[in-house]
Image (tube, rainbow, N blue to C red):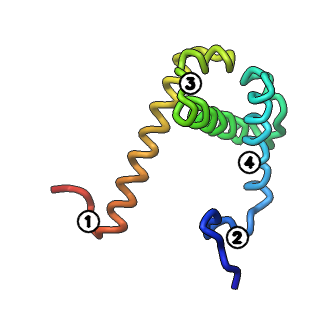
Amino acid sequence: MLLLSMADTWYDELPESEEDRMYTESVKRIQNGVQQGMTFEKASGLIEAVDEAQKAEILNDALKVLIAQFHFSEGVPLDNLAKKLGLPLARLEQAKKAMLEEVEQAAIERYKEETGRDGNA
């Protein structure tokens, strides 16, 4: 049995599928490209997606990762981030809203799991 440090998480030891590895690598490539000064569109050209649906998912998630990193973690205003990424502010606002809705839904599901309740009064 492997002992995990406090920084490790249990899922870090799970085997990753080839698709998961490609997805993770693609998001990291976009993230690294933006950190090197590329626009989001230019950084998006660094990935190799199998199909358009997969590429759309990767791009949407990569944008959310960048919003989390720059806006939430580093405090960069969303309009400044939009300029840095070369994207319309409305696209970032839409992605931010989707992120918050996903977090809300995950919190509700977690509450239900932990309490055995459905959340309704």
Assess whether mark 1 and mark 3 are in contact (beta carbons under 8 angstroms).
Answer: no
Callout 4: 10 Å neighbours few (<14), some, many (20+)? many
How far from the left and from the top, in percent, is residue 72? 52, 34
Residue lying at 70% horizontally and 70% vertically, measured from the top left:
13
Assess whether mark 2 and mark 1 are in contact (beta carbons under 8 angstroms).
Answer: no
Answer with mark 3 or mark 2, whichever residue precedes in sequence.
2
Answer with mark 1 or mark 2, whichever residue precedes in sequence.
2
How far from the left and from the top, in percent, is residue 78? 53, 21
Number of marks present in the image shown: 4
Q: Give the number of the mark in front: 1 or 2.
A: 2
Give how far apart the Cα atoms at labels 3 and 4 are: 26 Å
Q: Which residue is mark 1?
A: 117
Q: Which residue is mark 2?
A: 13
Give how far apart the Cα atoms at labels 1 and 2 are: 31 Å
Callout 4 amino acid = Tyr
How far from the left and from the top, in percent, is residue 105? 40, 49
Give the left or right position of residue 66, taking residue 100 as reference.
right
Give how far apart the Cα atoms at labels 4 and 2 are: 17 Å
Residue lying at 15% horizontally and 56% vertically, measured from the top left:
121
Q: Which mark is residue 104?
A: none
Q: Which residue is mark 4?
A: 23
Callout 2: 10 Å neighbours few (<14), some, many (20+)? few
Give how far apart the Cα atoms at labels 3 and 2 are: 33 Å
Q: Considering the numbered disc 4 on the image, is that residue within a helix, a strand or a loop?
A: helix
Q: Considering the numbered disc 1 on the image, is that residue within a helix, a strand or a loop?
A: loop
Callout 2 amino acid = Glu
Q: Which residue is mark 3?
A: 76
Q: Quadrant of residue 1?
A: bottom right
